[in-house]
Amino acid sequence: MTRHVVIVGAGPAGLAAAASALRAGARVTLLDTAERPGGQYHRMLPDAYRAERNGRLHHGWARFDRLRRHVLGHPRCAWWPESAVWSLERSDPGDPAPPLVHVLRGPADGAGRDRLVLRPDALVLAPGAHDRVLPFPGWDLPGVYTAGAAQALAKGERVVVGDRVVIGGAGPFLLPVAASLIEAGSAVLAVLEANPARTVARGWGRRPWELAPQAGKAGELAEYAALLARHRVPYRTGRAVVEARGDGRVEEVVTARLRADWSVLPGTERVVAVDAACVSHGFSPQLELPAAAGCALRDTASGPFTEVDGDQLTSVPGVYAAGEITGIAGAPAARAEGLLAGWLAAGGAPAAPELRPLRRARDRARAFAGRLAAAHPIGAGWPGWLRADTVVCRCEETDFGTLCRAADDRAGGAARAVKLGTRAGLGPCQARICGPTVAELLRRRAAGAPGRPAEGLAPATPHHRPIAQPIRLGELARPPRDPHEKENTP
Amino acid sequence: MSPRIVPASSDAARRRDTPLQITVDGAAVAGVEGQTVAGVLLAAGRRSWRAGPSGAPRGVFCGIGACFDCLVTVNGERDVRACRRRAVDGDAVSTQSRAGTGEPR
Ligand SMILES: Cc1cc2nc3c(=O)[nH]c(=O)nc-3n(C[C@H](O)[C@H](O)[C@H](O)COP(=O)(O)OP(=O)(O)OC[C@H]3O[C@@H](n4cnc5c(N)ncnc54)[C@H](O)[C@@H]3O)c2cc1C
Ligand code: FES
């Protein structure tokens, strides 16, 4: 019987997985909350823009366009746009079937969406990541955006966030964001990499042969660097946005030189007038779905990721993972992982000769991820940027002072108690944004007494959100429909 | 200056826009078919439209549906992420505030 592979996410990883699973003979359901495939990297303009040259805004467009047409037009592929996977239902212990996939299909957060359930033979999770942004005074002012937001708005709907923009944080991702804003006509005043040149060079310079296979990526970055130079946009290392100020919106940012550990070098502060600031200190993988499926996570210096074996298989039978949820390594790496995951999820032979180059590409991609992390780490000194009244949890407006007091309280300093006491992480975003920050602040405060338990409370499991995407009560009340059962019963 | 949309006439992507109109708290706001509700609001020069528990202004932060800063009510449905919802001609959008409600949401 033809295997049914469900793929969550149609970014570089998910789209590659779909192509590969189709090639191995499977029937594929590819779904994404977005209306169009491409994910964050190849975020397409809406159909309604009737753009003749969407490719002008992208790298590797021709290849993506061919892949997208091939996959979406394939007779064995069902493409489900505007489809949010809101829950994964684990099978009974001992049952090797992968979890059931619960889907809401329709306009984002709409009340009348179609509720469906899929019973795959194998599942590929490829939901990607979102920006990780560390707090600093004023980061909650309107006009301060994640770098990803500026990128998504510019690439995805041609909206530019401002005319005088400072971009800051860590990682090579700051460069394409600068390029998009320049292309869209903004004045980018500076791109600030918080790590000193020494750290960046050491990370990238070690084992340079690992970079060669990522030549596409290196070439892309070189192009951005040339664009910055042409527009006289300074790229500074060892400097960061440490404060945003303004009355109801950002009007100026304070930048400062940082030491290697990201503590501020006093006296190096500079005030820059801006109408927008874009910050990103790295990426947080979207771990709700792997957590819901029960997949083991792997702890790294840059936080937890989904653990996979050499076949991209997670710890749960039939559940594969690909792309940024297994490690942050960019689009080519996501693609390589997707190709492997899709083939194997479809039941393709693990020893097939054509897998050899794919495995090699994937291994190089993993090495690349390691270098990326080494070249652009988050320095330990960032909490020094915070003041007592600096908001840490944007939703609940819990400030740094309140968090510190709760953490130091001997009775309730455990993560879960602090969360309940201060409400940090209990707002609408469910700790997606502040979760890693709060966890790290608490870990540090508790350095003397690690893992102090709070009696009667389960430990905090930051990625476990039983509901991965919002669902309304009315929708929950309706029984889900199995689209394939419907097909079979005339 | 403020956020804006790249004019179709100078866009390298060569768009052919179709105008649309929504209302925001009753006032008409012009946009373009295909924009998200957040895109319409930003392009109209608005940076914030929601108020947090203290009344602090919120608009777009993450842009991709992760932060929930941008929530609005669309045609009576509360808590719609403006950065993810496509605007439809005639949509009645109203802004939300948690200030002074004391509600632990
Ligand atoms: C906002 C943003 C912009 C970025 N822009 C760039 C860029 O311009 N250049 C660059 O080199 N890198 C960019 N990146 C980095 C980017 O993450 C990788 O380059 C690459 O896109 C990762 O591929 P992926 O397939 O793992 O994930 P993604 O491309 O993120 O694709 C994941 C897809 O899964 C979907 N999804 C997630 N959860 C669900 C769910 N529950 N149900 C249904 N669908 C779901 C998402 O809608 C998304 O389309 C960006 C990252 C972010 C967060
Ligand atoms: S801006 Fe973050 S959810 Fe909309």
Image (cartoon, coloured by chain):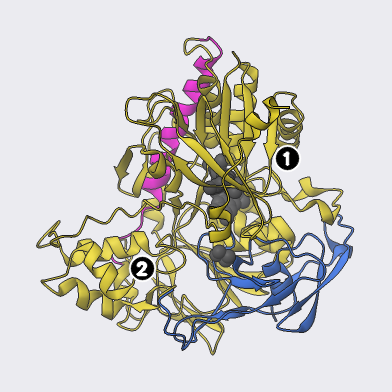
Chain colours: A yellow, B blue
Q: Left or right: where does residue A198 sit relative to residue A445?
A: right
Q: Main secondary structure of the magenta part?
A: helix
**Mark 1 vs mark 2, CA separation in Å:** 38 Å
Q: Is residue A301 left or right of residue A231?
A: left
Q: Position of residue A227 (x, y in %)?
A: 67, 55
Q: Which residue is mark 2?
A: A258
Residue B50, located in which quarter of the rendered image?
Answer: bottom right
In the image, what residue occupies the spot 77% across and 30% down? A73
For the residue pair A234 and A135, the one nearer the viewer reads as: A135
Which chain does the numbered disc 1 sit on? A
Within the displayed image, which quadrant is ligand 2 positioned in?
Answer: bottom right
Q: Nearer the viewer, residue A107 or A195?
A: A107
In the displayed structure image, the side of residue A99 where residue A483 appears, left or right: right
**Residue drawn 50% across and 26% down?**
A122
* A204, above or below B104, in the image: above
Tell me whether marks 1 and 2 sit on the same chain: yes
Q: Quadrant of residue B5?
A: bottom right
Look at label 1 and name its amino acid. Trp
Above or below for A481 versus A188: above
Residue marked by disc 1:
A61
State the residue at coordinates (73%, 60%).
Answer: A157
Query: For the residues carrying marks 1 and 2, which lies nearer the camera in this image?
Result: 1
Question: Tag 2's secondary structure?
Answer: loop
Q: Earlier in the sequence, mark 1 or mark 2?
A: 1
| Percent coordinates x, y for residue A453 in the rendering | 13, 59
Give, as a three-letter code, the residue at label 2.
Answer: Leu
Q: Position of residue A311 (x, y in %)?
A: 43, 23
Label 1 crowding class (10 Å Cα cut-off): few <14, some 14-19, many 20+?
some
